[in-house]
């Protein structure tokens, strides 16, 4: 299933408290299957919004794979992915299992590659992507509501600290960037020889990072990851008192 704000193709999972949730698989979905899915998603929504949301029997732990939601939010927040939680936001449920967040998808607006939209600048390093934007609701408020729950906050903070000691340490982040980009060097050279757009300031309505070389683009990416991680270290993984004024500026 996919939350895909204002861009769904259907069939839609309908209920109270969310919108724009479409079933992506199976293609031959039966009406009774859609009814069952809709009822389960309603239980998920109600549990997240219940008076004791972290109760293992009646709250969200009874219906969702909590660790997958923790990891999903961390992945989207470190990237500050512009479509997070409203578009290209996938969830799935295997038979006999709980609702699982993921897979991660659609990162063309992530990692500080976009510097603004329609003339408005961005601040990717600070702030939360899961908080409401422009004062409007998104496809659902699950992620924001989960992040306001102290038990969920505790789990995501502990997971972040664990990752920062391993694969998301500054040292490992820099090593990963170099590992993933090194094999692309020759391909990148050929690409920008054919399409000389490193200095192009706009793609569609989005302003982009402009540099003279591809290597400078990689430096921007790496510096962003280090700066964003440092901010997340200080954040305590707690929502701020004010909602984000925009996407994600």
Image (tube, rainbow, N blue to C red):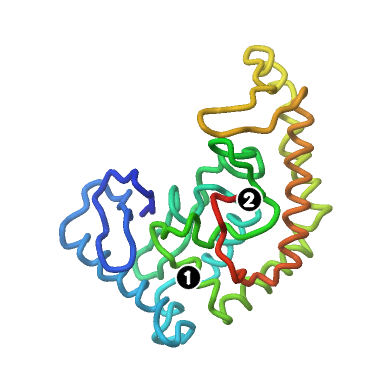
Q: Mark 1 vs mark 2: which is more N-terminal?
A: 1
Q: Distance between the residues labelled 1 and 2?
A: 22 Å
Q: Which residue appears at 75% of the width and 27% of the height?
A: 211
Q: How many labels does the image show?
A: 2
Q: Mark 2 points at which residue?
A: 79
Q: Where is residue 131 in the image (x, y as percent from the top left)?
A: 53, 62
Q: Which residue appears at 39% of the width and 69% of the height?
A: 97
Q: Where is residue 35 in the image (x, y as percent from the top left)?
A: 20, 64
Q: Where is residue 103 in the image (x, y as percent from the top left)?
A: 49, 53
Element type where label 2 sits in the image = helix
Write down the quadrant of residue 190 in the picture. Answer: top right
Q: Indicate left or right for 56 with 6 as reference.
A: right
Q: Mark 1 points at which residue?
A: 65
Q: Which residue appears at 64% of the width and 26% of the height?
A: 201
Nearer to the camera, 41 or 137: 137
Q: Where is residue 125 in the image (x, y as percent from the top left)?
A: 70, 52
């Amino acid at each position: 299933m996919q939350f895909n704000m204002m861009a769904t193709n259907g069939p839609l999972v309908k209920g109270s408290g969310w919108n724009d949730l479409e079933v992506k698989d199976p293609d031959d979905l039966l009406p009774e299957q859609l009814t069952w899915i809709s009822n389960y998603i309603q239980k998920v929504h109600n549990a997240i919004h219940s008076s004791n949301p972290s109760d293992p029997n009646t709250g969200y732990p009874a219906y969702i794979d909590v660790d997958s939601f923790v990891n999903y939010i961390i992945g989207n927040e470190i990237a500050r992915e512009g479509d997070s939680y409203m578009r290209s936001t996938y969830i799935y449920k295997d038979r006999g299992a709980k609702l699982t967040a993921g897979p991660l998808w659609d990162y063309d607006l992530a990692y500080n590659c976009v510097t603004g939209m329609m003339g408005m600048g961005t601040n990717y390093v600070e702030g939360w992507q899961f908080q409401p934007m422009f004062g409007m609701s998104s496809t659902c408020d699950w992620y924001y509501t989960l992040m306001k729950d102290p038990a969920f906050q505790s789990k995501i903070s502990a997971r972040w600290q664990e990752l920062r000691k391993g694969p998301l340490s500054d040292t490992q982040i820099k090593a990963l960037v170099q590992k993933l980009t090194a094999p692309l060097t020759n391909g990148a050279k050929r690409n920008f020889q054919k399409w000389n757009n490193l200095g192009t300031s706009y793609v569609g309505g989005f302003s982009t990072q402009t540099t003279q070389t591809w290597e400078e683009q990689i430096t921007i990416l790496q510096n962003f990851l280090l700066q964003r991680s440092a901010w997340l270290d200080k954040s305590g993984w707690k929502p701020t008192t004010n909602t984000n004024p925009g996407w994600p500026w």
